[in-house]
Image (cartoon, rainbow, N blue to C red):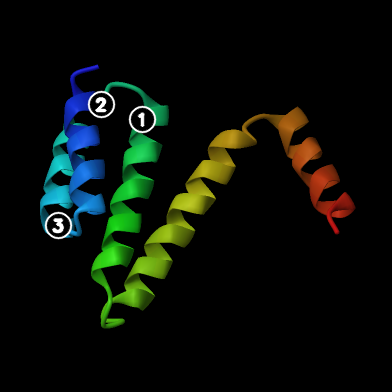
Amino acid sequence: MRATPSTYAGYVKNSLGDHSDAQISFQKALELATNTDRHYELERIMLETRWFQSVSGAGVDDLLEALKSLHRRLDSEMYKGADLQKEKAKNRDTAW
């Protein structure tokens, strides 16, 4: 719960276009977060904030790699266990 004020401060700073300070707020929230779900959420919002900062396109390739890495870890976390691996395969096979 201690991470929540820092998280909301980061959201406000992002909305105001102060992305550097938003990153600092999100980093503080990440350090205070105590559960895995919150860590993933904060990591995602920090990557999104980097995206906002990359107006010039500089560092976009690194950012995309970081987003792909986060996606792989989330996917792995979501489909832990043999039954869930089968469900993932079934969903992939029936996707449009």
What residue is rendered at 58% in x and 44% in y? 75
- Asked which secondary structure carries label 1, the reply is helix
Residue 93, position as x, y percentages in the image: 87, 53
Looking at the rendered structure, the kind of residue marked 3 is Asp
The alpha-carbon separation of the residues under discs 2 and 3 comes to 22 Å
> Would residue 32 be seen by someone viewing this image from the given angle?
no
Question: Which residue has dot 3 on it?
Answer: 18
**Do the numbered discs 2 and 1 sit on residues whose CB atoms are within 8 Å?**
yes
Residue 30, position as x, y percentages in the image: 23, 35
Quadrant of the image containing the C terminus = bottom right
Residue 47, position as x, y percentages in the image: 33, 56
Q: Sequence order check: which comes first, mark 2 or mark 3?
A: 3
Q: Nearer the viewer, mark 2 or mark 3?
A: 3
Looking at the rendered structure, the kind of residue marked 1 is Arg
Q: How crowded is mark 2: few (under 14 residues within 10 Å), some or many (20 or more)?
A: some
Residue 84, position as x, y percentages in the image: 73, 32
In the picture, the disc for residue 38 is 1
Above or below: residue 42 compared with residue 65: above
- Asked which secondary structure carries label 3, the reply is loop
The alpha-carbon separation of the residues under discs 1 and 3 comes to 22 Å
Residue 24 vs residue 49: left or right? left
Question: Which residue has dot 2 on it?
Answer: 33
- Asked which secondary structure carries label 2, the reply is loop
Residue 88 vs residue 37: left or right? right
Which quadrant of the view contains residue 10? top left
What residue is rendered at 38% in x and 48% in y? 44
What residue is rendered at 85% in x and 44% in y? 90
Q: Residue furthest top?
A: 1
User: Which sits in the foreground, 66 or 50?
Assistant: 50
What residue is rendered at 41% in x and 67% in y? 65
Q: Residues within 10 Å of mark 1 (few under 14, many from 20)?
A: some
